[in-house]
Image (cartoon, rainbow, N blue to C red):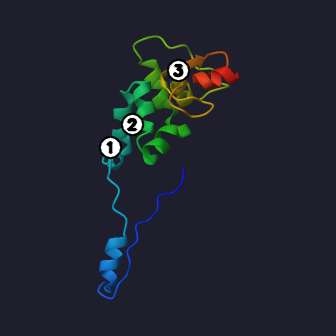
């Protein structure tokens, strides 16, 4: 995907003030999402909240921003995922320890993206191969 072009203005003698030119060329601030304050919580409080989330919720929270993703996908957060899978109301088969980590397993069960091409049409879970694929990638296999 090509980068967006940056807006430029023609500098005329009437517009010589550096401050006004800088304001016109500066990029607008990014909007902060609804979860931006949650990263400011103390970690023990945040982990206590996460303990009560379902695996699908943990997966969606990990997509929210880079900070939450790094917290949930680090190896020291394995206990959160284990507790979440253990407290899930319906029985989920045990994760194959040697092939997938728990966040990948949650993505296999609850996700909708193709593991091959990354499209959002990953309808088919291939349990023998432990991956989710879209119809196009299924035809290739």
Q: How many marks?
A: 3
Q: Residues within 10 Å of mark 2 (few under 14, many from 20)?
A: some
From this view, report whether residue 114 is shown above or below residue 13: above
Cα distance between the residues tagged 1 and 3: 29 Å
Q: Residues within 10 Å of mark 1 (few under 14, many from 20)?
A: few
From this view, report whether residue 124 is shown above or below residue 40: above
The quarter holding residue 2 reads bottom right
Q: Quadrant of the C terminus?
A: top right
Pinpoint residue 68: horizontal percent, then vertical percent: 43, 43
User: Element type at marker 1?
Assistant: loop
Point out the tag, 1 or 2, that comes first from the N-terminus: 1
The quarter holding residue 130 reads top right
Q: Which residue is mark 3?
A: 123
Q: Nearer the viewer, mark 2 or mark 3?
A: 3
> Could you tell me if residue 97 is visible in this image?
no
Residue drawn at the location 52% of the way across and 38% of the way down:
73
Point out the tag, 2 or 3, that comes first from the N-terminus: 2
Point out the tag, 1 or 3, that comes first from the N-terminus: 1
> Could you tell me if residue 73 is visible in this image?
yes
Cα distance between the residues tagged 1 and 2: 15 Å
Q: Nearer the viewer, residue 111 or 13?
A: 13
Cα distance between the residues tagged 2 and 3: 32 Å
Q: Which residue is mark 2?
A: 47
Q: Which residue is mark 1?
A: 35
């Amino acid at each position: 995907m090509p980068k967006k072009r940056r807006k430029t203005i023609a500098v005329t003698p009437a517009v010589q003030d550096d401050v006004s030119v800088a304001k016109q060329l500066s990029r607008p601030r990014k909007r902060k999402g609804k979860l931006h304050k949650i990263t400011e919580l103390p970690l023990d409080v945040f982990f206590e909240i996460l303990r009560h989330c379902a695996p699908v919720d943990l997966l969606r929270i990990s997509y929210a921003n880079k900070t939450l993703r790094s917290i949930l996908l680090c190896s020291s957060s394995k206990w959160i995922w284990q507790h979440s899978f253990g407290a899930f109301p319906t029985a989920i088969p045990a994760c194959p320890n040697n092939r997938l980590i728990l966040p990948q397993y949650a993505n296999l069960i609850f996700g909708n993206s193709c593991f091959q091409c990354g499209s959002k049409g990953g309808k088919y879970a291939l349990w023998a191969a432990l991956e989710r694929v879209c119809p196009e990638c299924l035809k290739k296999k």
